[in-house]
Amino acid sequence: MKTNPGRFFEDYTLGEVIPHAVPRTVTAGERALYHALYPARGALYSSDEFARACGLPGSPIDDLAAFHLVFGKTVPDISLNAVANLGYAEGRWLAPVWPGDTLTARSTVIGLKQNSNGKTGVVWVRTEGLNQYGAIILSYVRWVMVRKGNPEAPAPETVVPELSDAVAAGDLAVPEGLDFTGYDFAQAGEPHAWGDYDVGERIDHVDGSTVEEAEHMLATRLWQNTAKVHFDATFRPDGQRLIYGGHVISMARALSFNGLANAQMIVALNGGAHANPCFSGTTIKAWSEVLDRAETSAPGVGALRLRLVATSGGEPFTLRGEDGKYLSHVLLDLDYWALVPR
Amino acid sequence: MKTNPGRFFEDYTLGEVIPHAVPRTVTAGERALYHALYPARGALYSSDEFARACGLPGSPIDDLAAFHLVFGKTVPDISLNAVANLGYAEGRWLAPVWPGDTLTARSTVIGLKQNSNGKTGVVWVRTEGLNQYGAIILSYVRWVMVRKGNPEAPAPETVVPELSDAVAAGDLAVPEGLDFTGYDFAQAGEPHAWGDYDVGERIDHVDGSTVEEAEHMLATRLWQNTAKVHFDATFRPDGQRLIYGGHVISMARALSFNGLANAQMIVALNGGAHANPCFSGTTIKAWSEVLDRAETSAPGVGALRLRLVATSGGEPFTLRGEDGKYLSHVLLDLDYWALVPR
Amino acid sequence: MKTNPGRFFEDYTLGEVIPHAVPRTVTAGERALYHALYPARGALYSSDEFARACGLPGSPIDDLAAFHLVFGKTVPDISLNAVANLGYAEGRWLAPVWPGDTLTARSTVIGLKQNSNGKTGVVWVRTEGLNQYGAIILSYVRWVMVRKGNPEAPAPETVVPELSDAVAAGDLAVPEGLDFTGYDFAQAGEPHAWGDYDVGERIDHVDGSTVEEAEHMLATRLWQNTAKVHFDATFRPDGQRLIYGGHVISMARALSFNGLANAQMIVALNGGAHANPCFSGTTIKAWSEVLDRAETSAPGVGALRLRLVATSGGEPFTLRGEDGKYLSHVLLDLDYWALVPR
């Protein structure tokens, strides 16, 4: 058989390094599309001049575009037969991606646990994205539930990796040269600096964006994500396509500009859950909560740890029901660190 | 509150200069998207080689893309609480925008008039778009009706600016170096030169383009326009989003290629009205009328003053009913100057 | 009349060379859009680094994007009044198109045959795409059935060109410098080399992609294709737009990555039929058949002649009914040569 059937649970071995296919050169074209697909307005990613005034050589490719490009490469090897995308941890953006860079990706299997039903198992991988110089630009852990292809295949030894609840502030990688001491708040769009945000503060981002089939498919294809459920209407009786969770992440992050315009760079992904599936016609809204604050050694640069919640409506700031489960209007619960001018 | 509530009528002061946020570097990516979103075929904006043969260093970013990028920046400060976009005047494109340029924008309040109902008022602003060298690339006047946030706020002194009916031919800014003496009509797509158009002549552009939700949202996001009504289906009972008026302008202008292929560069916006709202599913058609002709001092370059009417159908060349009001199928009535080879 | 009514059958003269309008500079922006519109994953067109490792100066513009750009230019002159697009033959890609290149096109009338009904006729043209250096980058024959404008116009002398069934293997143009001896199969996505494919072998590409109106219109506009039926919903009672056949070609070709990831470059189009029309909502699937194999003189480079069939469902590998006609689920039957690492 010439086509890729995807890997099943028994096909993964602890410690195995899986090189992912299809390197990708990223350009101003991908940036423009990102700005058409999402209401992204972060000045650092919109203007070369603004980025240069912040000590960078130019405007980098949006952090989440880099994430999606790396993530997309892993799909044919990691999640083609996945039943569920269970979580993320220890994600760190280690260097900006510049127009002209070529990205590759690889994943290392760091955990395996067959489920008691004998039909599925959980696979933990650490995925690394690299640029053309071999530098790791992004590293994160993801775990997915994967079907077994052969139910008779023996269960592997159970290894569950120990994962941090959050990336420690001291481990945040601030891009070389970044300097927010001359930060132009007026051009960035909001006056609120790092010191204006309190731990526990919550922000309703107010704006909403209704998603169309054409949009999420354009986005998901752009990242070369091959999961069939995002593209093939025959998978579901209603003809809808399941929207790639990363589309919801990018939409919510872009909507969070309104109130967090100065949370410029994402430098860590502490965790995240796709609480409910998202389909076209949904009007995505977002709210944030400040979870933590930290200083960095870079001039004028602070860090905020933020919860970003995407919803399909419902009351802002509601998250879980009395049973502890996510409410039905919650699409995403993301925990990340961003760099903010002090 | 961290989010931007927008300005209300009482928040504007005569003479105030409002710097708009989020500078934007424009690239070949934005150009490609413009050409996917609109059936734009003007040779000067399609081919670097054609542009160089016309004395320019390369193909500029489409004039209307530059307009939308500047306009989009003004929305959070000018029209977030607008009830209606009332008009444009004295628009001049003063220099081409090149791939790699970074645009910023500012507006000066030049007029204020509270309405007799005491609940709304009209704000006139002169908006200027600038490139990274500080050169003004676009300047236009827009007036909008804005809600008062506090009905008790005192009315400002009424100042209504005097605005020209049209930019005088002598005030048209012809791009430096533009030379149409060797203009290649065959490559441009039509044989009709400046002298072939008569004042009063009307052209039915024949083609139609049906608009989808995904398309106008991609376009409007690309211009970083944040008006909620264009993106959020929950604003209207029918779930439709109001299409950004600029999307109709660009679509009609692109459709007008068929008959006006040589009306290459827009250099002035004399006036314009969004006569009726446009929603997805509409098939946009267009017709033009030659309003005036002028010579310029640039070699081989003439100017035509054109009326561009976008419709959702109806008989070509019909505009207003017996009551003087726009007919229901009229979407746009635009008055502009374009440069044409003589 | 200033608008282009298109040519009618009697407007073509044997031997006539028709220069097509609107030159186009292609950039990384068009490449990014191609990768958003189609699930294209060929490594040579995705990564500058991969392309350089294969002896090229960088990643070329996708072959089919070059085809669509050339094809689009011909529409106003060749197929605006076409009743049917009847066939392709003798297509050869003669040189890669690089970002920054400017394409033009011209067609030579090589055959004419009035139909017996006296109302239509068949026009054969050889179309050539050229870059800014005047080099022919693509050449193919297409024939279309065109309406007569004046039924009284006399029939021209019937000339039916002799066309090859397939481009001979020895006539395939391998891009200068192409060298697959160090080809990285892991990065390309599949281990199957030229020698792993047998003549007669058939591959079901498994994946499907459901097409939306917004997507095919974005694509077709990007190629500056002006055929009204693709854009104007008022042409059909159901409001659907006929999808440009080239959209189906690109979608099917991209889907064929799954099983033909190493069929990197299209170098010849032997023939093709748009068997049934395609409309939005269709889930396009694809299967391929290996028709022939050939060696080339370039290091490590072999060629496969492939049949690519796009369907709207149905059983894979079914093509024609007992009556010899295409089955109703067959959208496209394409015959092409691709370069594959040996």
Image (tube, coloured by chain):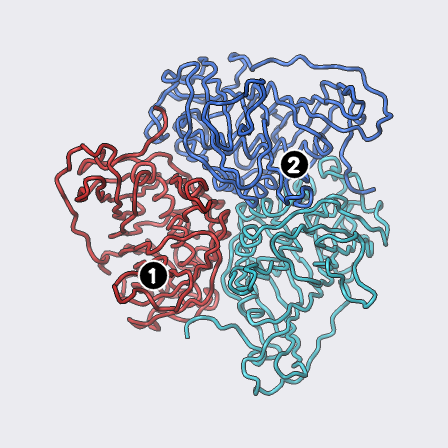
Chain colours: A blue, B red, C cyan
Q: Is residue B260 above or below residue B58?
A: below
Q: Is residue B340 visible?
A: yes
Residue that badge 2 annotates: A23
Residue that badge 1 annotates: B339
**Quadrant hosting residue C168:** bottom right
Q: Give, as a three-letter code, the residue at label 1.
A: Leu
What chain letter is assigned to the residue under label 2?
A: A
The dot on residue C62 is none
Mark 2 crowd level (few <14, some 14–19, many ≥20, 10 Å Cα): many
Task: Kindly state the secondary structure of the residue where label 1 is placed.
Answer: strand
Residue C122: image location, x then y, percent: 65, 76
Of the 4 image quadrants, the one containing the N terminus of chain C is bottom left
**Direction from residue B88 to residue C309 in the image, left or right:** right
- Picture residue at 73% right of the left edge, 61% below the top: C328
Residue A15: image location, x then y, percent: 75, 19
Q: Nearer the viewer, residue B178 or A246?
A: A246
Q: Nearer the viewer, residue B6 or A44?
A: B6
Residue C207: image location, x then y, percent: 71, 44
